[in-house]
Image (spheres, helix red, strand yellow):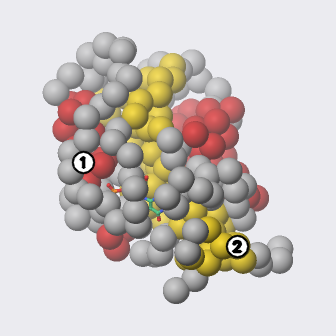
């Protein structure tokens, strides 16, 4: 596949993970979830906005009975995470006794997922796990156990396939990384 370079705001990005690889990895993740949650009727909690493409492609490939709900946390404005614990918006389901799987676009420092898991555990789910499209293990600042990771990446800022840079880039079908 031919590499492509694009400009978003003040930064240049080049193709990094092509759609074919993304879908292949998501397919493997879906098979794993199907196996692990076959009898559990999980509740998937998709964290908007960044997870929307990942969630659509993942859940089309999951075949066990499941529910999906969309939640929102405070928005992410720049290239660095703020580290604040963010309030959960839009969680209307009673998750007590449910098997919950959080669906995230990317785990960077882990602040977001760490804060989210703390708040979810207070509601007594039967279990709660995290499935993320991307993870930057070198950036992690919490001892997080992220069970389902489609793809690990180094500490580079990426856009595309749901991920944005200050509002732009979410619609790109491949993932691009910043050109230093
Ligand atoms: P964390 O709290 O540092 O783990 O950051 C999680 C959130 O930061 C993600 O849900 C994204 O919205 C955003 N984020 C982190 N790294 C990137 C990136 O490389 N590109 C776009 N957004 C990112």
Residue indicated by mark 1: 114
If you read the primary sequence from the N terminus, does the residue marked by circle 1 or circle 2 appear first? 2
In the image as oriented, which residue stretches furthest toward the right?
A: 1
The mark lying in front, picked from 1 and 2, is 2
Could you tell me residue 96's position as x and y percent?
26, 16
Instruction: Give the structural element (helix, strand or loop) at label 2.
Output: strand
Position of residue 7 in the picture relative to residue 104 (left or right): right
Could you tell me residue 92's position as x and y percent?
36, 15
Could you tell me residue 115's position as x and y percent?
22, 44
Q: Quadrant of the N terminus?
A: bottom right
Q: How many marks?
A: 2
Query: Badge 2: how crowded within 10 Å, few (<14), some, or many (20+)?
Result: some
Residue 91 appears in the figure? yes
Q: Residue at x 68, y 32 (%)?
A: 60
Q: In which of the image's four quarters is ligand 1 placed?
A: bottom left
Could you tell me residue 86's position as x and y percent?
25, 41
Label 1 residue near ligand 1, CB within 8 Å: yes
In the image as oriented, which residue stretches furthest toward the bottom?
A: 180
Query: Badge 1: how crowded within 10 Å, few (<14), some, or many (20+)?
Result: some
Q: Residue at x 34, y 66 (%)?
A: 80
Position of residue 128 in the picture relative to residue 102 (left or right): left
Residue closest to the eye, 174 or 61:
174
Q: Which mark is residue 135?
A: none
Residue indicated by mark 2: 6
Q: CA distance from mark 1 to mark 2?
A: 33 Å
Rendered position, 78 above or below 58: below
């Amino acid at each position: 596949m031919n590499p492509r370079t694009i400009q978003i705001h003040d930064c240049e990005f080049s193709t990094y993970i092509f759609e074919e690889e993304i879908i292949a990895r998501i397919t493997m993740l879906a098979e794993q979830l199907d196996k692990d949650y076959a009898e559990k009727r999980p509740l998937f909690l998709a964290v908007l906005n960044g997870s929307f493409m990942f969630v659509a492609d993942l859940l089309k490939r999951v075949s066990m009975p499941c529910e999906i709900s969309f939640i929102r946390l405070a928005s992410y404005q720049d290239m660095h995470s703020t580290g604040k614990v963010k309030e959960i918006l839009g969680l209307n389901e009673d998750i007590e006794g449910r098997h919950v799987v959080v669906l995230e676009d990317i785990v960077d420092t882990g602040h977001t997922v760490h804060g989210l898991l703390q708040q979810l555990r207070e509601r007594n789910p039967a279990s709660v796990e995290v499935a993320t499209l991307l993870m930057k293990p070198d950036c992690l600042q919490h001892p997080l156990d992220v069970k389902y990771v489609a793809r690990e990446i180094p500490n580079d800022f990426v856009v595309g396939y749901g991920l944005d840079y200050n509002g732009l880039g979410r619609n790109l079908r491949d993932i691009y990384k910043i050109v230093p």
